[in-house]
Amino acid sequence: MIKFFRRIRKRLADDNKPVKYFRYAIILLNVFSFSCGTETNNFTTSSDGVEIRFDMQGKGKTTLIFVHGWANNKSIWDEQVAHFSKKYNVITIDLAGFGESGNNRDNWTMSAFGEDIVAVINYLELKNVILVGFSMGAPVVIESAMRIPDKILGLVLVDYLHDVEIKYSPEVIHYMDSIYMDVVTNPTMEKLAPFFKKNKEESFKRIVSMLKNNDKPIVGWRESLNDDFRWVNEDFVASLKKIKIPIISINSTQPTTNVEAFKKYVPSFYAKIIPDTGHVVFWDDPETFNNFLEESVQDFKKGN
């Protein structure tokens, strides 16, 4: 449709009968506007000018925003979208550098990713929001919530930030960097074994598809991975001290979740554990995950 109006504008400039084409343009514009109804463009711009893509389904007074982890994209949540959009307004977002979002970013930090989420929430004028962050998405939703606490009902951290007291040494960070970058550039079933325990062939194909379908060069992945580790070392505890929003975790059994350490900073914190699952707990056991998340949503709503 945008291309059509560009052609009309050119004809208006070139044709000897501009009024005729102008009338056609007005008629079609009215038809187009009517057919769109209240449909919203599925992109907005983050605070540093990067285009952020998102999908929105369902409707309701409560909005669930699902934030993916490192090296994946919003499609990782497809089963949760299908389930929760029957009852809630559900949004999935591609963080900058991943999926369909732009990658023209200079500072690949958890703080910058947090601004991506804030941009979508402000663009859609949302309130009563519950943020669900998987893996690297966990620090991202914490960063987001600190910026707009009045719009957030609660945070759900999915299989990450198991231990508030953990610190990564430079040697460990260097090692993890080499391991993870190798996984995404040369994925194999063996390398991806920790990520899922069930439906292995299907899950492997799905991850490889996400990596191969990334239509842009890998930009910012290594930088964001390293800032994730830095954030855990330097910003995690400080962020928990500042935040006054309820937080729960839905984790696998490995590693063990240090609930008591978390409660030092968020007394109401609790963790729901799904046994016999890999890192992507909502792929390995979607039914239990969805039930746990629904329970958590109801708890957040009761507390507000």
Image: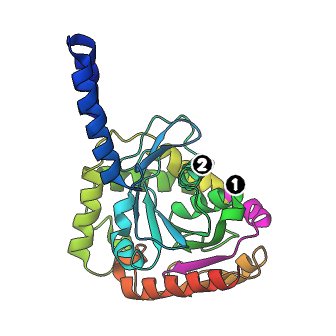
Q: Are marks 2 and 1 in contact (CB under 8 Å)?
A: yes
Which three-letter amino acid code belongs to the residue tagged 1? Arg
Q: Which residue is mark 2?
A: 115
Q: Secondary structure at mark 2?
A: helix
Name the residue tied to disc 1.
147
The foreground one among 102 and 16 is: 16
Colouring used for the render: rainbow
Q: Nearer the viewer, residue 218 or 190?
A: 218
Q: Quadrant of the C terminus?
A: bottom right
Q: In this rendering, does residue 219 appear at all?
A: yes
> Where residue 218 sits: x, y (%)?
37, 42
Residue 134 visible from this viewpoint: no
Location of residue 202 with respect to 287 vertically, above or below: above
Q: In terms of secondary structure, where does tag 1 sit? A: helix
Count of all numbered marks drawn on residues in the image: 2
Q: In the drawing, does residue 302 fall left or right of residue 104?
A: right
Quick check: 7 above or below 276?
A: above
**Magenta range:** 233-252
Q: Amino acid at mark 2?
A: Glu
Q: Residue at x 55, y 73 (%)?
A: 62
Residue 155 occupies quadrant:
bottom right
